Amino acid sequence: MTRTRKTFDGSSRTRSPERGDSSAGLAWIGGKCLCTALILIAFSIFPPAVCRAEQDVPCLDQASREAAIVLISPDSRVVYQRNEHRPYVPASTLKLLTALTAIHHLGLTFRFRTAFYMDSSDNLKIKGYGDPMLTSEVWQEIADELSHRFRSINDLVLDISYFSQDLRIPGTGRSANPYDAPPGALCANFSTVFFRRDRQGRIVTSEAQTPITAFARGKIRSLGLKQGRYTICHDAAEAARYAGALLACFLRRKGTEIRGTIRPGLVTPEDKRVFTWVSPFTLKDVIQKMMAFSSNFVANQICITTGARVYGPPGTLDKGMRVLRDYANKELHLKDITLVEGSGVSRKNRLTVLDMATVLDRFRPYRHLLRSEGCSFYKTGTLKGIRTRAGYFEPAPGRIWRFVVFLNHGETEMNAIMACMERNFVGRDRQTARNPRRQSQ
């Protein structure tokens, strides 16, 4: 059996408007091109697609009519833009704003904590504070620490009061897909389980570090799941129960006897704190993992935790969104955006490519936390019928271009647009950086 790295949940992206075709005619006014004739016919139905560029870029002008694009040079000049004021669904590129907000309020060195208490009846109580990185490996380390302190306990009590228990994220459902994993104060493995069936049809783990507990096996059977990675929890209480069952399994393996049951409960002032787990992952690490796997679960945990830290517990979606909107409005001066959750899974989120370009400007020092390819650092987003991408080109040290593309079509058009921008703008900038004499000539 091989050890596997956890995968995270869904991602997202988008698409947008284009110019009129050649039958519309292009009128050059003040060095800027306006797509007019054909679009004016339908003006009462669709907002016009306006294209402005410092030079003619046919490969961008041929993008679909709904495409929204902005490209900004290292000296902050907008060298190409179209449909830049039209709001779109940002999909998972919204995670850039969620990350920025958390960095602002918590700091890159922030670490999640999980506290453990013992009461007068020898019940071990666990109070969760929203740590999204409580994987099987982490729970094993926690069990190691606790087993050195306690050879026997009564009940294992789960305190999930730091988050509201009725959290519902807009855009998610109650499916077994990992992107529907619910947020919670106390979770394990992103509230997912990875399993397969052996030749006899029995449920067995697909990752050596994660045992299939009786709780997990019961959920797999009740949901009728075959094999793969699924979320088996649909509310905060179930998520905590899964985490508690996993910890109990590891404690027993370490020789700690659990005489009682696993149950919900609350920490009281009389309880004695016996251990605090401090995550080995800083917020910087968590954000990098969130971006790499486009984890909606991690984004929601970060957003709700930030809200609880700023406005006090319990963490709620409303508090998380207040923090997000306040940061966007007061720090970034984005006034006309619509935000309903922080992962990008909801189609009710709305902002423009210029709004996202502003987010990118502030995120610039943290660009290396994003996925990289060639000279590009970027975040993608995908929902059904939506593709988005936002990020940076850095053809030479310090030469940082920002780009945002929101589409309503497929990956093929996105790739063509990216190749066009890199060929017509970034590639020339790279050559100029290598041969500075060319510019003077």
Image (cartoon, rainbow, N blue to C red):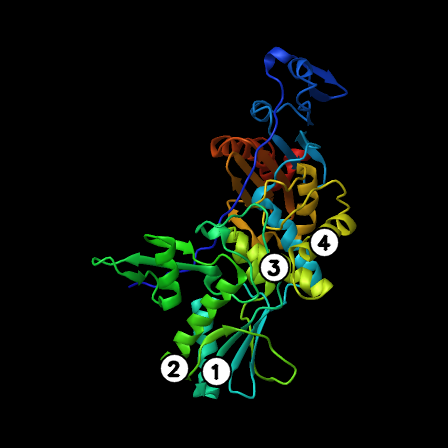
Q: Which residue is mark 1?
A: 146
Percent from the top left, x then y, of residue 220?
37, 58
Q: Find the distance from the CA under tag 2 to the CA under tag 1.
A: 9 Å
State which tag comes first along the sequence, 1 or 3: 1
Quarter-of-image position of residue 19: top right
Residue visible at 64% across and 45% down? 400
**Separation (CA) of disc 4 from disc 3:** 14 Å
Label whose residue precedes the other's in the sequence (1 or 4): 1
Q: Identify the residue under disc 4.
A: 322
Identify the secondary structure beneath mark 1: helix
Name which quarter of the figure residue 34 lies in. Answer: top right
Q: CA distance from mark 4 to mark 2?
A: 44 Å
- Amino acid type at mark 2: Lys
Q: Amino acid at mark 1?
A: Leu
Name the residue located 51 percent from the left edge and 83 percent from the top edge: 123
Mark 3 sits on what residue? Answer: 302
User: In the rendered view, would you say 233 is above or below 398?
Assistant: below
Q: Is residue 107 above or below residue 24?
A: below
SS type, badge 2: loop
Left or right? Give the position of 49 relative to 257: right
- Local packing at callout 4 (Cα closer than 10 Å; few below 14, some 14-19, many 20+) is some
Q: Marks 3 and 2: in contact by CB < 8 Å?
A: no
Q: Which residue is mark 2?
A: 254
